[in-house]
Image (tube, rainbow, N blue to C red):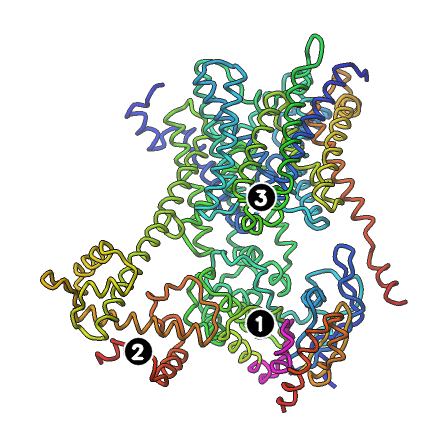
Amino acid sequence: MTTPPLQINSLNVSYHSKLVLWDVGVSIQPGRTTAIVGPNGAGKSTLLKAALGLIPASSGDISFYGGPLRKCRSRVAYVPQRESVDWDFPVNARDVVAMGLYRRIGWCLPVRSIHRRMADEALADVGMADFACRQISQLSGGQQQRVFLARALAQKADLYLMDEPFASVDAATEQAILAVLERIKNAGGTVVCVHHDLETVAQYFDDAVLLNMRIVAQGPVIDVMTPENLRKTYGARLALVDELETNLSSSIPARK
Amino acid sequence: MAYPTLENVLRILTLQDHNTRIVLAGACAFGVAAGLVGAFLLLRKRSLLGDTLGHATLPGVAIGFLIAYGTGIDPRSFLPLALGATLTSVAGIAALLLIRRFSTIKDDAALAIVLSVFFGFGVALLSAIQQLPGGFASGLEHLIYGSAATMSSTDTSFVLVSSLCIAVICIALFKEFSLLCFDEPYARSSGWPATALDLLLMSLVVWTTVVGIQTVGILLVVALLVIPPASARFWCDGMGAMATVSALCGGLSCLFGVFLSALFPKWPTGALIVLSAGAIFAAGLVFGPTRGILIRSIRTRREELKLRRDHMLRAVFECAENSSESVPLSQLLTKRPWSRRHVTSEIARLADRGLLTFSLSNDSVQLTTTGLSEARRLVRNHRLWELYLIQHAEIAPAHVDRDADRIEHVLSLRIVEELEDILDQRPHDRLVPRDPEKSHL
Amino acid sequence: MIWTELDTWIVIAGALTAMSCALPGVFLQLNKQSMLGDAISHAVLPGIAIAFLLSGSKDTLPMLAGALAAGVLTAILSGTIQRIGQVEQGASLGVVFCVFFAVGILLVRVAADHVDLDPSCVLFGSLELAVIQSSGIPKVVWTSLITLAVNSVLVALFFKELRLSAFDNRYAASAGIPPESVRLGLTILTSITSVMAFESIGSILVIAMLIVPGATALLFCRSVGSVLFASLGFAALASAGGHLLAISTIPAMLSYLLDNPDIGSVSSAGMMATCAGLMFFSILLGKILSKPRGASVTQVDTQ
């Protein structure tokens, strides 16, 4: 059996002395796309950030490809939430994408034309080739999201961790992101997405992790996205779950 | 007040004074270094960090002085004061990081806390020093008001070397610092030591501050860290350009300030440098080509005029039903809620540009060939945009002037073709004019 | 150490001033305008110099008016530059107060041709000198008492508007409370409070007391009301503690270290600021140390 790209065991995270993740264990399968699903405040983004060491974990262990993250940094790419940065920053789309290459360029060396070309290729992969020179504040929300995605693609990683890439984007961006996910998968890469939209989980992803401070269920979408599991994840918000039940039962069999 | 004679002006401008040369070299080097460091501070939204650290050096200077006094060294010698200043501003940084890491206090409040508490302690220690026999206190006072004009050549070489080091570090780590400022979590996730970079950046601020306070005074340090980068943002859009312009503004402010104070020896150099920086800022605020007020209002005005032109062309086009028939003004007036005055002035403008002709005899307008093809393009663009917004439920791309940008330039060719197909499939829909450029081929 | 009537007045005047600063300061901090106090303390200089040049005297009233005008202008101008120039808040404030201060220094230097106007008397007004009076209650106590009373009444009257616009200014605007005017009112109130205190007591106490007591309260208080009351308490406590340090501990320490018994009490205002900081940082440290560590969390999970 191959080593999972990301393996998390009994992870605990607390924020301002409030427990956010509780004994979380996740195993991500290689070559598949996985959605992390759960209600607001369930700790979805926290899980990604803790895995990447961006916020300190109280306890637990995390391994990327069977080792610590620092041994395989270049194989892991992170796409933060769009809101996490100031889009008024004086850079253009190409500059942002080139940031994905900074590690490869190395300390103190400048970005050269070969890197700019690589950045342009990554932009073309998300359908943004025409926008390379545009100031990032003049891009729409969906285009900004695609720039972030291109930055991760430029890294040419094997595992992509994306924080809400589908949040409030337009249809064109949604299509572009889906195409990228497909392409990564075909090349043997692995994708983990924090996802908020229950209805599209089954269409977009292979696996799902249901999370509400602790893991409710994980595995292939068909097995995981059951009404019972959803009820456990979303608790009292039954109306929502009932409504989804009908949608899910129609959407899941439709997929093979 | 005595005005300088022409001879004097020439003498100063040709740098014949040894003193002017020294002050100029020191101040300009410092201005460039501060401008560079300040650019990163501004983008990290910590412009006033220099202000805080500048104030935080006061207790350090006092402590250095007291230790030197207690151990019998000349208390006004440079080293103990600089060491003390470095020590307390580093402590200030530690306090800031502590607050940031362990509380929900906002950054600006943390800056104010560290500033006031450290400065308060400094004031208390200074009041003790004032009571010491020997009247040393007056020597410390120039730290607060600056004394760039009294820079000695030792001071200058110290400032030159430090500024050079600071500038070299900023340039060498330009890409790393930019990434840190833009997206710290990403920098961290891709393996950059973000905390160490952050500390390094802050150490550069400490270095700048300590160097500056010893030579040019606290006010000048704060001003040169804050004003040039803020001015630079009016002039350019890219990170590299911004840092360059910021360094340039810093150097220029110092150049002007030093020349002015050489011309008017009574006026304090520091204040003149700050005022030069302020003047550059004001010029940028008004005339800056990327964010200046003037350019933005011109742009708004131009867009407004263009929009009015486009509306008028489209109205005439629709009335004439895709031909160059003449359209009576009365029909235009019923078509849109426009006043007669608006319509006539607008028509005059369009006629000037040869887009349409106006005949007084029957009070009607007629599109010229250029006007017709321009109107076709506009209507086509407009309809395609409308359709695009409906079809793709897109959150409209911000900052796109929908009528001005040709749809092909904003959307991919595939989407445009798809949209054109949809329009063709809808016989009830008003005919979309073909792309006039294609029809010429 | 000998505690005299003077010491009592110093503590009272300091506490009253500190409390009158703490009230608007809490809202300044919630509005992310914490550096305004420092900015105003520098920016009043040209106002004072112009008032002096125009009136030709060192009377309090014209100087106060000049300082006030400069303070309010700083707040308005930096807000305007921030808005129309799209400059970040801290930077626009920095630009304005640096330029103002430079103009002030220039004017003072020009004025110095005629008469001696020492800028440091404006920035380091002395609490110790302010309370010296032959008999009765010192004037500074009355002025600071009046400032405190006015501030308390205003904050009480506009409490809900201030709180709402600090918390969510878009909602406040939709609810008919224009955040611009609330913010303007707040900055004017801050300017008045600061300038009143600069004149008698000096700037450092003001800069510190605008922010530090409120920040200390924010470390553990959950509601704006409790923050206000706690910050009043901290402000008073810091004044008393600071003066005590200034007249006993610090001089004693320095005399011992320097082997020089001549050092009397040090600046009370400076030590009051220091004391407020000591309280803030000790509470912060206490919070950090009492925080549940990783070990305890694991125990919960293994149950």
Crowd class of label 2 (few under 14; some 14 to 19; many from 20; radius 10 Å): some
Dot 2 falls on a residue whose secondary structure is loop
Part of the protein shown in magenta: A182-205
Q: Is there a contact, CB below 8 Å, between mark 2 and mark 1? A: no
Q: Position of residue C240 (x, y in %)?
A: 76, 26
Q: Which residue is mark 1?
A: A166
Q: Which residue is mark 3?
A: B205
Q: Is residue B247 above or below residue A176?
A: above
Q: Is residue B414 magenta?
A: no
Dot in front, 1 or 3: 1
In-front residue for pair C221/C35: C221
What kind of residue is marked 2?
Answer: Val
**Mark 1 — on which chain does it sit?**
A
Q: Which mark is residue B270?
A: none
Crowd class of label 3 (few under 14; some 14 to 19; many from 20; radius 10 Å): many
Residue A90 shown left or right of residue B307 in the figure: right
Q: Residue at x 45, y 16 (%)?
A: C55
What kind of residue is marked 1?
Answer: Phe
Q: Which mark is residue B432?
A: 2
Picture quarter containing residue B303? bottom left
Residue furthest to the left in view is B361
Label 2 and label 3: CA atoms lie apart by: 61 Å
What kind of residue is marked 3?
Answer: Val
Residue furthest to the right in view is C303
In-front residue for pair A153/C61: C61
Label 1 and label 3: CA atoms lie apart by: 40 Å
In-front residue for pair A149/B429: B429
Picture quarter containing residue B363? bottom left
Q: Is residue A158 above or below residue B111?
A: below
